[in-house]
Image (spheres, helix red, strand yellow):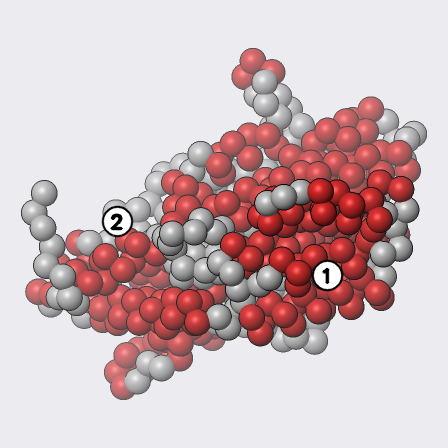
Amino acid sequence: MGGAAGGVPGGVSGVAGSGVSGVAGGGVPGSVPAGAMGEGNVRTSFLRDYDRIIFSSAFRRLQNKTQVFPLPGPVFVHNRLTHSLEVASVGRSLGKAVGDAIAGRYADWGEEFEEFYKYELPSVIAAGCLAHDIGNPPFGHSGEDAIRNFFRELTGDARKRYEGELSQNQQRDFLYFEGNANAFRTLTHNFNERALGGFRLTYATLASIVKYPSDSLNGFNKQQLVTKKSGFFDSEVDTYKAIAGELGIPRRGGDLNVYARHPYVYLVEAADDICYRIIDFEDAHRLNIISIETIRDLFLSFFDDEKGYNSRERVEKTFHEINDDNQKVQYLRAMLINLLIFRVRDIFMDREQLLLEGNLEKSLIDYLPPRELALMKKIDAFSVEHIYNHRSVVEIEIAGYNVIGGMLKEFFGAVLSPRSVKSEKLLQLISKQFVISREPGHLYGDIQSVVDFISGMTDLYAVDLYRKITGMTFPQIR
């Protein structure tokens, strides 16, 4: 599976010594082979990636970040952490299905090639899936909108300084703040630590999460898939260049910071696409927003043309034998995810050459057969009407605007006037992990530190701090 986007036989795996990152602001690749075992021959570098993510505080905080529905509540629904774990599970299975197919197609490419694709690719995709939402701010996607909206509505001297001291690309990092780009920053930036490289993940894992390999200046142009949004901030441009150079990922925009997608991105994206569509329905059913009949009719329709184990007759028979409605939904969810994993595997393998050339212009889900794609579109339309615009979802979006907007007003104001008494007090609240220089010419970095601080908060911590700094509640001495 070689080619322009590959760099080594087997595509963009980072096998044969090019996989361990050690990056920070464009640092050089590490010297340890990506497939090398760690101490005691227990873990490969790709398993280590997974472990470093799952044991991180940034990942743990996802347990109190909204996925779709507000948290906490009397009915347990998915949060960012449970969603990420489930996406990683699907991604691992998808990586195994694709890896086995690649190893079988290129059976004469050697033992190292076979070992990577049969046994390591699932770990790479699972780690990418695990980290894909790690940069999302509190309150779901409304948190991203709140950050964007704050900077777009700057006025007076604040706007003059913002536009005067930041480059266009730096300005757009906040005007079009993107959780995907923030995930890449979270994983690669060393913040206030001396050790370079952030989480020090392999290049293969890092490349697999960058869905939109473009900077902010060239992103948010929906004419191309790679520029639909952005994948890295101005501060991480050199880091991504190092990864692209090492893995042989070609540019798509001449001298611009726009690159082809790494083929593994499509697998991470597909795992997420499968999960959120199906799991959001499961949550909505638990909250009595969607009836069991609606889910039955939509999900069972995917099996109309299947035979044997996946035949509609067999699936529907098992469905009716289950007594509890929640268990019925879980059964259909499991069967549909399994079906879609193998659909996506076949789509990936059928379009191998386009993937390696960096020329596949749609997500893998969008290449489903017409009847199944129409069912997916039906799920999307139903979700928009009945789930994403449900009253509870809208309420938390409004709360997110107020809480995040209110904190940005306070902390951004403190960065602009760091020597005032109030500003000094406010800046003391920011963790030492996020450096505030208080010096002229460092406004971009200072704003980033404020946004890093706020976007890393959990929903409850953000609400609590907002109430305290605005005087809505009085802090207790403990």
Which quarter of the image is occupied by the N terminus?
top right
| 309 relative position to 288: left or right | right
- Residue 7 picture quarter: top right
Which SS class for mark 2?
loop
Indicate the position of residue 436 as horizontal and vertical percent values: 26, 57
Residue 297 circle label: 1
- Amino acid type at circle 1 is Asp
Can residue 370 be seen from the camera position used here?
yes
Residue 318 circle label: none
Q: Is residue 356 above or below residue 167?
A: above
- Give the camera-side residue of 296 and 333: 296
- Residue 143 picture quarter: bottom left
The residue depicted at 40 percent of the width and 59 percent of the height is 70
- Give the camera-side residue of 351 and 16: 351
The residue depicted at 41 percent of the width and 46 percent of the height is 63
- Amino acid type at circle 2 is Ser
- Give the camera-side residue of 315 and 388: 315
The residue depicted at 84 percent of the width and 40 percent of the height is 309
Tell me the residue that label 2 is attached to: 431
Q: Residue furthest bottom?
A: 156
